[in-house]
Amino acid sequence: MTPDLPPQLEVVDGIAGGSAAREFDRRHDARQQRVQTNHPKIGRLLLAVFDDPQSTKAWSTGAVGEQRLGGMLAQIAGPAIRVLNDRRIPRSTANIDHLVVCPTGVFVVDAKRYRDARPELRVEGGLIRPREELLIVGGRERTTLVEGMHKQLDLVRTALAGERDGPVQGVLCFVDADWPVIGGSFTVQGVSVMWPKKLRSVLTAAGPLDPDRIADVQWQLHEAFPRQRDSRSKNW
């Protein structure tokens, strides 16, 4: 009698950028309905002249970044690199953009799209006051992105408590950013900051995890962070 095989997902599960795209559609449609209800005579004209507010367009921008990064991850995915896209955080409206399990461990990847803006590390203090690492993007402080990543890392590490399959690492991956020709990637408060091609080289590096264990960890993460309800895969 053949023993039951352990449950297994496709090497890529979930739709990259799905949550962000749906939120953009929801806000866009709600604004159109609101404007046409409040201004029945000139509503269509107002919508044609005035675009969605930045707070709405940001969701579309984010969705494009996640989709492009998801496309790169799909290119390198296989038995030794397994990907979970757009994962639900239970009891929360937040999501995790990408979880990647590869030979060197688990990577929590947050896709960011700041067009032509340069990510930089700024260090303040160190003598009179405590040393502080800040994330600067396009000249503006964006350290809250690092704080958000640490919250995700805490959740993933809790879900994998007791596992000894390599580190859980956080990555802020900036799509379409203004990276220098030489160098550019850095670490801020323990979180790596890089671009998609650099991330690709990190994820494809050799490590101790074999394909069977990688599949097991992917399934464990899938159970802790399910796909969004309208993100479908072929088998599950």
Image: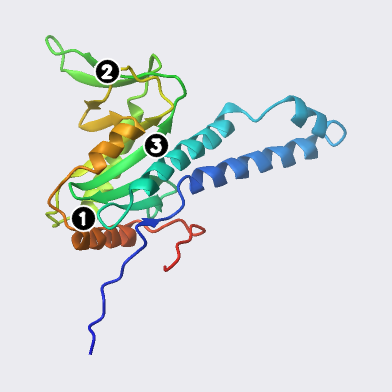
Q: Which residue is mark 2?
A: 182
Who's the residue at 29% across and 29% down the image? 193
Q: Is residue 177 above or below residue 32?
A: above
Q: Give neighbour class at mark 1: few <14, some 14-19, many 20+ (Cα, 10 Å).
A: some
Q: Which residue is disc 3 drawn over? A: 111
Q: Is residue 117 above or below residue 221?
A: above
Query: Does 205 appear above or below 135?
Result: below
Q: Earlier in the sequence, mark 3 or mark 1?
A: 3
Name the residue tied to disc 1: 160
Return the x and y of residue 76 as percentages of the image width and height: 33, 47
Q: Image quadrant of residue 69?
A: top left
* Quarter of the rendering occupied by the C terminus: bottom left
Q: Is residue 53 toward the left or the right of residue 141 in the image? A: right
Amino acid type for the residue under numbered disc 1: Leu
Decide if residue 1 is on the left or right side of residue 116: left
Q: Nearer the viewer, mark 3 or mark 1?
A: 3
Q: Position of residue 200 (x, y in %)?
A: 30, 39
What residue lies at 75% left-to-right and 25% top-to-bottom?
49
Q: Amino acid at mark 3?
A: Ala
Q: Position of residue 181 (x, y in %)?
A: 32, 17
In the current view of this chain or complex, which residue is farthest to the bottom?
A: 1
Q: Nearer the viewer, residue 54 or 171?
A: 171
Q: Nearer the viewer, mark 2 or mark 1?
A: 2
Q: Residue at the spot x=48%, y=44% of the render?
A: 17
Any part of residue 147 in sight: no
Callout 3: helix, strand or loop? Answer: strand
Image color mode: rainbow
Q: Amino acid at mark 2?
A: Ile
Q: Residues within 10 Å of mark 2 (few under 14, many from 20)?
A: few
Q: What's the distance in space between the residues labelled 3 and 1, CA to CA?
A: 22 Å
Q: Where is the N terminus found, in terms of image quarters?
A: bottom left
Which label number is shown at residue 97?
none
